[in-house]
Image (spheres, helix red, strand yellow):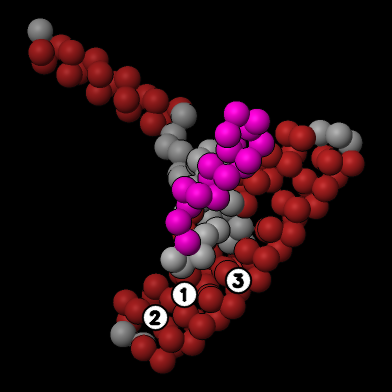
Amino acid sequence: MESQWTAISSAIRESADKVVGRRQPTRKPWLSDMTFDIIRRKYTARKQGDHKERNRLKRLFEKSAKNDREQFLNRVADDAEAGMARNDLRAAYRAIDRSVCNGRGSLKVRPSRFLEQNEDPEPRLWAGTFSSSSQW
């Protein structure tokens, strides 16, 4: 029974791999083909032990990736602005998700970014509640 199940499941998996294929994860969608070419050349230089060429390609990659990221964020901002002009908030939310959350759907904000170094968040959090209340 077990050997039959193994044979069937392996046949299904092989067929699915041939027909559908595997999906490659996209971690940094803003990288251009030229930047990926630099990555491949840097990899071959590292494998050949050419440290000077690898370091040169590393610096070139950093510049190229920075430019690609800036162009990507500009395109995302343009899409968001076009959506806002059409009163389409979905485009703005999508732009925020793509630029800040990297498409994972969760925005992580560290409270330390918004508070002073030694500031306690509690008084500021409750100040609006108690000042607007007539009971206190």
Helix, strand or loop at label 3? It is helix
User: Is residue 5 on the magenta stretch?
Assistant: no
| Start-end of magenta stretch | 119-136
Nearer to me, 20 or 136:
136
Mark yes or no: residue 102 visible: no
Helix, strand or loop at label 2? It is helix
- The residue labelled by disc 2 is 45
* Dot label at residue 101: none
Pointer 1 with pointer 2, Cβ within 8 A: yes
132 vs 19, left or right, is: right
Mark yes or no: residue 35 visible: yes
Helix, strand or loop at label 1? It is helix
- The residue labelled by disc 3 is 66
| Quarter of the picture holding the N terminus | top left
Nearer to me, 128 or 96:
128
The percent coordinates of residue 132 (x first, y second) are: 66, 36
Q: Residue at x 52, y 60 (%)?
A: 115
Q: Is residue 107 above or below residue 3?
A: below
- Locate residue 42: give its quadrant: bottom left
Q: Amino acid at mark 2?
A: Ala
* Dot label at residue 41: 1
Looking at marks 2 and 3 on the same chain, the residue that comes earlier in the sequence is marked by 2
Whole-number angstrom distance, CA of label 2 to CA of label 3: 22 Å
Q: Residue at x 77, y 35 (%)?
A: 89
At label 2, counting other C-alpha atoms closer than 10 Å, the crowd grade (few under 14, some 14-19, many 20 or more) is some
Looking at marks 1 and 3 on the same chain, the residue that comes earlier in the sequence is marked by 1
Q: Is residue 29 above or below residue 33?
A: above
Q: Amino acid at mark 1?
A: Arg
